[in-house]
Image (cartoon, coloured by chain):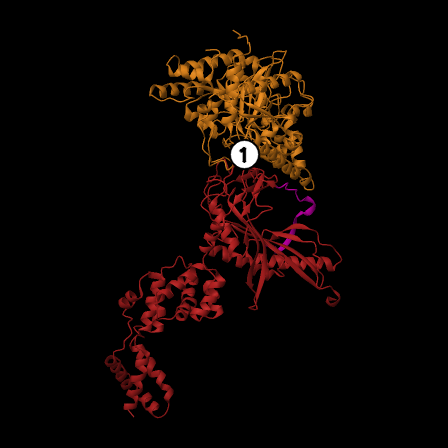
Chain colours: A orange, B red
Amino acid sequence: MDYLSLTEARDALRRGETSSTALTQAMLDRIVALDNDLQSYLTITDELALEQAAAADQRRANGEDGPLLGIPVAIKDIISVQGVPNTAGSKILEGFIPPYDAFVVQKLKEAGAVILGKTNTDEFAMGSSTENSAYVTTRNPWDLERVPGGSSGGSATAVSAQMAFAALGTDTGGSVRQPASLCGIVGLRPTYGRISRWGVVAFASSLDQVSMFGRTVADCTALFQATAGYDPRDSTSLDVPVPDFAAGLTGDIRGLRVGVPAEYFIEGIDQEVETAVRAAIAKLQELGAKIRPISLPHTRYALPVYYLIAPAEASANLARYDGVRYGPRLPGADMIDTVKKTRALFGPEVKRRIMLGTYVLSAGYYDEYYGRALKVRTLIKQDFLNAFEQVDVIACPTSPTTAFKIGERADDPLNMYLADIFTLSVNLSASCGLSVPCGFDSKGLPIGLQLIGNTLQEATILNAAYAYEQATGWHRQVPTLTVQD
Amino acid sequence: MIDTMTQYEPIIGLEIHAELMTNSKMFCSCQVVDSVQAEPNTAVCPVCLGMPGMLPVINRRAVEYAMRVALALNCAVQQHNIFARKNYFYPDLPKAYQLTQYELPIGLRGWLDIELEDGSTKRIRVRRVHMEEDTGKLTHLDRTAVAAEEGTLVDYNRSGVPLLEIVSEPDIHSGEEARAYAMKIRQILRYLGVNAGDLEKGVFRVEPNISIRPIGTTAFGKRTELKNLNSFKSLADGTAFEIARQTEVLNSGGQVVQETRGWHDTKRITFSQRSKEEAEDYRYFPEPDLPPLAISDAWIAAVKAALPELPDAKVQRYQADYGLSAYDARVLTEEKAVAEWFETAVSLSPSSPDPKTIANWIINNLFSLMNEHKQSIDAIRVTPAGLAELLELVERRAINNNTAKEVLAAMFTSGQSAPAIVQAQGLAQVSDEGAITAVIERTLDAHPDNVAAYLGGKERLIGFFVGQVMREMRGKADPAVVNRLLAAALAARK
């Protein structure tokens, strides 16, 4: 069962060579064997998983089929699953059990997917290493001394170490693409509004997007296909047709116009990363793509703009966690004191961003900070719209470095923020993006190629990634992990 | 003493919060319930409880209601609407921010004419009308009041109920004007069917901003905002109190502090609640969970076309078409239900009785019955058709006016029709000249002295004879016929 991809498992199910129950049990066994070291899951929903697996097997016995029917997957612990704890990696939601399924979870359940558990995340998805989780430190399967990236590091590690066939994450500034890059798997961040945010704990509402990991482009596409679509309960969800993405994976990219932005090959980028990404671009050319240089002139403002808008929205989104209606409550002398004591459960990075966001929205500072950030965000969006008049896909690194060591950047927030420097712009604009493995550095750590597409053009970047993946086969390399007895 | 004091001019602006009577809440599908009657926390869901990952969806009906109000108050309806997050912390606000229209409200620059006590009209400008959501309600338990219980209870039934804020320009100059303006707004909201107008239940809340300045100056003085006004009388009295208080403060050399003051309904004074220094910074920013709300020309046109006739228009029409006095027209249009009742009765009586007669019957007779029985027009058993039928009996001289009043009272309590009551109680007017003549002859025979006196010149005795005849006939005789025949009979005995 090891090394089976999602699509291979699906085919095995279709041929009757295995059952969902067998696949699920194998995954649960592997989690027991490996996750003590890797720490990717916060909650393992083994009972629910086996129930769902049995139900999926029954559905298949009744003649049903579907790309995810009986496939075990993992869910980032910021996406609500009814009856299962949803902590968002925070002590302030410890023990909170949502009475509702997120839209994406409803869709997965309808598709017959099996939910293995909830995966670790930086607290409220704020971070690039998953070290900001209030619970555990997740390890990178390629080197247990290193971070998996973040904030969806639990899901990335679970998929990379084959403790799930695919997994959902969220990507607010790069939180799926960056860990995908660091863990050597595929991570897709669809266009904002392509997938409903209903039931997903909000970090920065205008930037958050449910995103997904797979070990292959096709695996990632299967999860995307099942979760995409309009939801009237999310007013920012887009009421547009959802194409058949799997059918779009032809591997033919002849004539595809690929832009290479000068601003993404900057000083400070790891040389081995640049070399691998440039080689990947050359490979795309070899496959028939037309490479042309482009410019995204406002790129250097993306990081400051992001760190004004995201904390501002977060400061409002997180103000509700007061212990009055749900979650833990630390009793104080009176009503206000109780709330103050309860709020001390927030971790340091979250507090830092709440303070930052509160400051930039304050009277007298709004225009200078938040108001100006909104204007510059429009310029960044325009950069992309201009670029997509000339090219179909933008190719660049996902992360400036490979996986860094646990603790290495923990005390240096600014350095940590740089981990997302190449991914933030996608969230600030109306683009979509993905990371696909494109090699390894001399330490054997994975490198990711980022492909960015125009609004709702996920099919274009998925097919480009698929063509590249099929031509290179990086996805066939998997981390060597010792299964403990 | 008084002469040496500065004369001040009060400057007052009103903020009115009105809950919209939609079926569901502003941003979720929870039912809007009577927050006084419903069990606490029974009309709530994850959205209006602010649970993690929940998202708002705008209630289109609430937008339509807001548009009705904006149009009725002569505002320009804004087509590009944005909700903002107003951030403040209080446990009755589940998200810790209120969604409200901040920079781009649905209605701007309207006006409203109010009638003053002297009968003149004054135009008050409306600065803005905007949509927002209501909060929940806190109840602070007091250990001394409720045995062994202490703490704060919270009820989120009201959380997320659509709320409209109507802000006037500071064009109001007295407590009475404030009352007239607020009552007129309430009247219009009720006409539009968007608000019940109940101050005590808090579905209609009025908060005046009051300042004074020396007459002849233009700069505004420091203002106070008045809260806890649970009746129109409190609004008028509280505002008047505050004007007097500020005047006294300035006249004694003090300074007015910019603050929020509460109205103490039993002591009938205002008291300081919160000073400006403690005022919060709400850190408004556009709600990212809601794209801008676009209102099309077609939608505005449709709402405008469906607006009901408003009180001022009705008053004018009643005077022009029905010949009513301005006073009667106002009385009949005060409540839309009464006006509709009146209009229905008129429509059912195409030629006679004329609208003026119907209006008189409603104002002079029906209202006193309603007062006596403490019933509103919606609750009474007399229908417009029933009144029209009754008045037609009078018009046909089937019954006389006095009998008709008795019949109306019987209709009011029994719900029976006028003909049925007339029939059952034998109240039909007698116009049969033979029958009346017989009674007249008997009456004259019984009072020979009075007949002699009458014939001797005491003509005012005619009233005595009429009374006797009417009594004999239990009030049912046609008074005109009685008069004519009586005169003839007396003449015959000369």
Q: Is residue A416 left or right of residue B45?
A: right
Q: Residue furthest top?
A: A485
The quarter of the rendered structure image containing the N terminus of chain A is: top left
Could you tell me which secondary element the residue under label 1 belongs to? loop
| Observer able to see residue A75 | no
Q: Residue furthest left?
A: B434
Q: Is residue B274 magenta?
A: yes
Location of residue B69 in the rendering, given as x and y in whole percent from the top left corner: 51, 53
Residue under numbered circle 1: A325
Which span of residues is magenta-colored?
B265-284
Q: Amino acid at mark 1?
A: Arg
Q: Is residue A337 left or right of residue A164?
A: right
Location of residue A148 in the rendering, given as x and y in whole percent from the top left corner: 59, 18
The residue depicted at 53 percent of the width and 36 percent of the height is B50
The residue depicted at 39 percent of the width and 20 percent of the height is A56
Q: Neighbour class for label 1 at 10 Å: few (<14), some, many (≥20)?
A: some
Location of residue A22 in the rendering, given as x and y in whole percent from the top left corner: 42, 13
**Chain of the residue on which disc 1 is drawn:** A
Classify residue B398 by image quadrant: bottom left
Q: Is residue B94 above or below residue B492?
A: above
Q: Is residue B60 above or below residue A266?
A: below
Q: Is residue A145 magenta?
A: no
